[in-house]
Image (cartoon, rainbow, N blue to C red):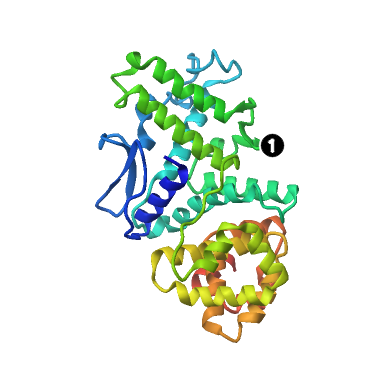
Amino acid sequence: MSLQSLYNEYLNIKFNRGLQPGQTEGFEYGLYEDGGAELFFAGHDDEPFVEWADALQPKDPRYTANPDWKPLLSGCFPDLDVYDEQILYFLLYTINSTTSIAGPNPYGAMNDFMKPYCFFQLGQVADAARLNDAQKEQLRDFFFFFYLYTHPVNEETLYGFSFRGRDLVHTKTGISVERYFSLYHDYYCDKHDEYKDRLLIAPHEIQAGKHLTLELLRSIEGKSSKLLMPSEEGFETVLRLINDVDELLRIHSEHQTKFFNLLRDALLDAGTNPYRVYCFRMLLQNYVCYILYFQFDDIHDLVDHLKDTPFACEKIVNMLFADAIFIQKIMRQHRIDIADYQDVTGFFAEKAREMHL
């Protein structure tokens, strides 16, 4: 099973695309009554992939005055303490939950968009030739922060990891996350008999889980082939720009008017088709993250070009500013006061005003 085939099935279910189920060898999606779905080990409708190690979760050392136990893998990682062990477990759960599909919930809708968006972009940004190394590192850190933040995780986990080259490491100890996760799964395979009362899956299934976890991790690290949004008839141009950051940057740089027209037309073409709407939202946030992040004043050109079609202009502006909080973080980083951009704020609806003014 490739990660791409699993991702296609994830999108198929999440957006009710009605396509034939894809290849998810060793795993299968189970649907819930609330509209959500979870990835299960094949033949185990009682064991979601994301929860396979729940019963093995390390004790919380913060509830003990003087924790006197050692981490499970202290023999392999002598610098690891029980606090580090816990946040590595939280990271494992967070990465595995990338496969989960939440049921409709208006209170969690923004996070439900932002986490998978960031996961997808982490694989895209690594090889974007039109970005220099410093820009790629800035965006990678930006996307990884929001990937964790919108899970959400606690503060220790949020700030506990960083990149060294393309390797994700536990910052305090320098431990490679890939090596830790690999040895973690191997430990429970080797000691399966000792933990069989708490494990509902067999050693070969733990290895399948290890393979999938590491594939998800490598996608985050930009080490594997980038994921692609699957095709949709009539929406080919939008998907081409989503799947190719360099093409997005090229068209915006060389044909800005064409790019803005494309945004306007894609808004209308998306209609009420859930997958198209999601792809259009991705394209707009790509404009935020790959263009406005580095040249925020381009927003003036966008509004100036679209103002003669006020419905489209208002809709696009409000999606840029209210669909996600990426732009909020960018404005804080660059000390931008959006109140100074009255051509933009003049199109704000109530939600955008509440968030930014």
- Rate crowding at label 1 as few (under 14), some (14 to 19) or many (20 or more) other CA atoms within 10 Å: few
Query: Which residue is depicted at the point 62% across and 62% down?
Result: 288
Query: Which residue is depicted at the point 32% across and 54% down?
Result: 20
Query: Which residue is depicted at the point 48% across and 69% down?
Result: 235
The local secondary structure at tag 1 comes to: loop
The quarter in which the N terminus is drawn is top left
Q: Is residue 143 above or below residue 90?
A: below
Residue 197 is situated, as x and y percent measured from the top left of the image, at 28, 19
Query: Which residue is depicted at the point 38% across and 27% down?
Result: 206
The quarter in which the C terminus is drawn is bottom right
Tell me which corner region of the image, top left, top right, bottom left or bottom right, holds residue 186.
top left
In the image, 128 versus 136, the foreground residue is: 128
**Residue 297 shows up from this direction:** no
Q: Is residue 160 left or right of residue 89?
A: right
Q: Is residue 340 above or below residue 293?
A: below
View extreme (bottom): residue? 308
Residue 284 is situated, as x and y percent measured from the top left of the image, at 56, 66
Tell me which corner region of the image, top left, top right, bottom left or bottom right, holds residue 326.
bottom right
**Three-letter amino acid code of the residue under disc 1:** Gly
Q: Which residue is mark 1?
A: 165
